């Protein structure tokens, strides 16, 4: 790196450590050389040189999203009893943020990296992952094996399960309500699988989505309002997640549309099941904590030198609530 930047090793070291009085031009040249070479300074300053790291880096889209927080709980339930600590980063489905997190986290030389799948990844991020010095496990996305191991669900299967559930109930006018499908590739895959399964039966899916609104209850409420104003004949709605489905249900109840007599509603992820009282949402239940625990156990096996299969797919099931008709 020093040779590429045209400076001495000592000068390059000072720039990377932020020490000494170095000209801005020299600093720029050194940092550019480091970027070009994929150099990652050890942020622990050699404190781990005499022992193996007990830190595991985890990057998820959002800690505030109960889905990913429960996956993280599954990870911690396995790693912490074994003496490992997790270092958490939130990507917010933003490739730039994810790249910055990867650069920082990998500089700490972690024992392993758990990385959420199903989002766009920058070329810099891909390059960093190719030069990683630890096992990398892909979380949440189980449709394809990637990195050293993948633990997640088949989002294509989830979309097909919803289609089958609605078709069994003779639904023909079906809609989808979602958000941020250009950022969340897993959600997009579920949407496309639903669309494809319905099209095979001669049904055109009507979609009402937004790229600027969050994946929360209020968005479900607003988009359901837009949907019913433009397509009042809709018989069933599948939502991106349970939170949006509950928002949509709130709107339907408010304007006097009976569920499921007039419109059926299906969510996704199963997060509403634990708090259901009178309204029990029909949803695709995902074993969220198990995804995290399986990923963590696979990492421990790798660190012990054991061979691990390339992918684990979480079992899925549609849980019948009172928002779709019984058959």
Image: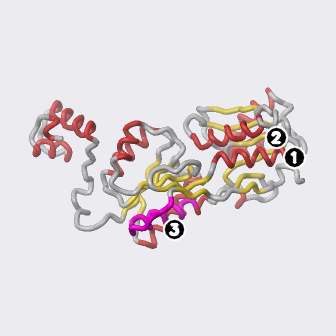
Mark with earlier residue (1, 3): 3
Magenta residues span: 291-309
Above or below, 176 against 169 in this view is above
Left-right relation of 166 to 207: right
Q: What residue sits right under mark 1 in the picture?
A: 169
Give the Cα distance between marks 1 and 3.
40 Å
Q: Residue at x 59, y 48 (%)?
A: 143
Give the Cα distance between marks 2 and 1.
10 Å
Find residue 48 and report its image quarter: bottom left
Give the Cα distance between marks 2 and 3.
38 Å
Question: Can you tell which mark lies on residue 77?
Answer: 3
Q: How is the image coloured?
A: secondary structure
Asked whether the residues under the numbered discs 2 and 1 touch, taking CB atoms below 8 Å apart as contact, a structural biologist would say yes
Q: Position of residue 31 (x, y in %)?
A: 23, 37
Mark with earlier residue (2, 3): 3
Left-right relation of 304 to 322: left
Find residue 189 and report its image quarter: top right
- Per the image, label 1 sits on a secondary structure element best described as loop
């Amino acid at each position: 790196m020093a040779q590429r930047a045209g400076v001495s090793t000592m000068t390059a070291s000072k720039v990377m450590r932020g020490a000494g009085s170095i000209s801005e031009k020299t600093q720029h040249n050194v940092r550019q050389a480091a970027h070009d070479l994929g150099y990652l300074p050890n942020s622990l300053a050699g404190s781990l040189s005499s022992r193996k790291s007990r830190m595991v880096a985890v990057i998820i889209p959002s800690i505030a999203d109960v889905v990913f927080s429960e996956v993280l709980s599954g990870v911690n339930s396995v790693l912490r009893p074994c003496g490992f600590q997790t270092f958490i980063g939130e990507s917010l489905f933003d490739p730039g943020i994810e790249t910055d997190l990867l650069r920082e986290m990998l500089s700490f030389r972690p024992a392993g990296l758990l990385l959420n799948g199903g989002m766009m990844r920058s070329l810099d991020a891909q390059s960093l992952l190719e030069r990683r010095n630890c096992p990398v496990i892909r979380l949440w996305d189980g449709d394809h094996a990637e990195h050293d191991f993948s633990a997640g669900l088949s989002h294509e299967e989830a979309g097909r399960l919803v289609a089958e559930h609605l078709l069994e109930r003779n639904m023909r006018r079906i809609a989808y309500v979602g958000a941020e499908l250009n950022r969340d590739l897993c959600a997009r895959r579920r949407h496309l699988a639903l669309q494809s399964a319905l099209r095979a039966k001669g049904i055109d899916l009507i979609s009402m989505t937004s790229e600027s609104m969050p994946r929360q209850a209020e968005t479900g409420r607003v988009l359901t309002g837009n949907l019913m104003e433009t397509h009042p004949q809709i018989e069933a709605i599948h939502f991106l997640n349970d939170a949006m489905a509950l928002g949509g249900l709130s709107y339907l109840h408010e304007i006097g549309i009976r569920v499921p007599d007039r419109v059926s509603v299906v969510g996704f992820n199963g997060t509403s099941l634990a708090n259901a009282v009178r309204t029990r949402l029909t949803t695709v239940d995902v074993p969220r904590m198990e995804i995290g625990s399986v990923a963590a156990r696979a990492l421990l096996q790798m660190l012990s030198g054991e061979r691990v299969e390339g992918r684990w797919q979480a079992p899925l099931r549609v849980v019948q609530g009172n928002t779709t008709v019984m058959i």
